[in-house]
Image (cartoon, grey):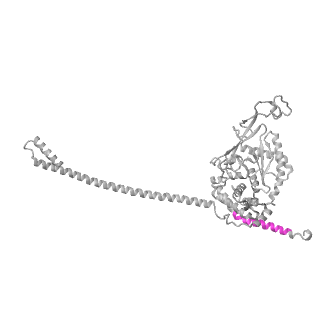
Amino acid sequence: MQDTLLRVFVVALGLLTYPRDDPGVEEWDDITTVGMQKHEERLLRGEELGDEMGAITDWEEDYLWYIWNTVSIISMIRFFRKYLGKISQIKQGEARAFPVTCTAAEMPLPDSETLQRFHSKCIQASSENKWKEFLEGFAKDLLEAMRTVCDGNSGMVIEDFQIVDVCNIIVPFTPPDPYSFQCLLWNNQASDLLPDMQVCGRIQLMKNKIQNGCPCQSSNSDDMVCLLHCETEEVKRKMTDVCAGLLCMKNSHFLSKSQVTRWFQNTIKQAWGQISHKYEFELNIRYIGAPGISFSMNPVVKVNADAHFFINPHSPNLDTSWTLSLTGYEDNFLEHISKRLPANSCHSQTLEIAHFLHRRQTVLSGSSTLEDLHFKIALMHLLLTKDPSQWKPSNVACRLRDLLAFMERSLKTKLLHHVLIGNPLSQRVIELPAEFTHANTVNLFHPLVVHNCLYRNAVMHFQEMLSNSHMLIQDYVEVYDLNDCKGHRLRGPGGLAY
């Protein structure tokens, strides 16, 4: 209908506009038809071209989609292959670092009776315990001479020594009056700055000043009578920082470990010069592997009666950061919890046998990061978790295996929390200061996480200790039994020796 109207309109317009000699209606109709056909042909060609372009575009999109999927699949395969390869390398590295040559569950151990004989003959009667009496007398003479040296140069005040272990002597010291130490505890999560000292602190040198400044409050005022202050009146004092004071770090009021070490060694040398004529042996400040008695004497600063700061030779970072020791609290813990155990409980025997094996392995293969403290903390964890009835004397073999298994798991996971820090269970046994119970937990094996070489060395040391334990115990027991038999054979009737 619309086409017809368009044609009529075009013809009428032509009749009105053009003369008679122009083409007629039929010709215009033909012309219009031809134009319309050409237009339709162009439209058809455009549609065909559009279809072709659409087909090409669809094909290109499909092609790109297939390529993208292929690349994605290949990338995912390579990613998982690399990821799984890393996991296998980590597992292989852990397997190499923790060689399962001997496990605590499978290691051969003598029975409880043999272990008790081993403990009584080889540990309780060992020469190390005999050395303790000699060391006590020697340390007493040496410290008296050290006090004389310090009094002569107005140095530090040396207090009474304490033997923490068989061959470990600690010597507390304090500054002279009117100075004092203020211990600042710092418990933080392990960081790269202090990987080996998670529970440490700094020691600040303070000076006591009397606020009113009266001469009667001075230290040398024994013969002075003051009309302003009575003897019972409390003296008002204030603490002030001392910059660059005694044994402090340069331009600081914090105690320096390096300066304390130099002062302590020089004082020992001078003191030994005063008493060396009493002893027929040489005293070497550094261990040189020569035969003799090896012991350590270290300066410490007391935090309180049961805790002190000491210099850890394995943690040289930060000259003003001192490592905290809770030896007094640990001993109190063992003393209190032993009251809940059966009579003659085996916990002390278990720990002492483990210490003996560890020290003998140290003699064989050298020192490692593992210390007696780690076995002690592991035993304290077992004492908190196991029923008291399981610590009977006849269970020493089982408890020794449990202790070694606990150490094995801790080494494998590189995790051994200190039992007294951040552990509410320890409050059931002894009362601890709030700064210890509310502090963050401390991983004593964090150095093994940071240093792979230390971890491999510790694992190798522990594995060799497990492998040698049975043979070492049997050899010691046989030697002592043989000596006992020879002693009996050498005695005839009436006790006469042949």
Counting labels gives 0
Q: Is residue 170 visible?
A: yes
Q: Is residue 468 magenta?
A: yes
The one of 77 and 346 positioned closer to us in this rendering: 346
Q: Is residue 128 left or right of residue 467?
A: right
The one of 118 and 232 positioned closer to us in this rendering: 232
The one of 54 and 326 positioned closer to us in this rendering: 326
- x and y, in percent, of residue 281 in the image: 83, 53
Q: Is residue 63 left or right of residue 482?
A: left
Main SS type for the magenta part?
helix
Residues in magenta, as a range: 466-487
Q: Is residue 280 magenta?
A: no
The residue at the point 83 percent across, 43 percent down is: 148
- Image quarter of residue 181: top right
Q: Is residue 319 visible?
A: no
The residue at the point 63 percent across, 57 percent down is: 413
- x and y, in percent, of residue 16 in the image: 10, 41
Q: Is residue 83 left or right of residue 143?
A: left
- x and y, in percent, of residue 238 in the image: 74, 34
Q: Is residue 263 left or right of residue 415?
A: right
- Image quarter of residue 180: top right
Residue found at the very far top of the displayed protein = 227
- x and y, in percent, of residue 31 in the image: 14, 48
- Work out whether 151 lies above or below 90: above
Q: Quadrant of the C terminus?
A: bottom right
The one of 210 and 82 positioned closer to us in this rendering: 210
- Work out whether 363 lies above or below 42: below
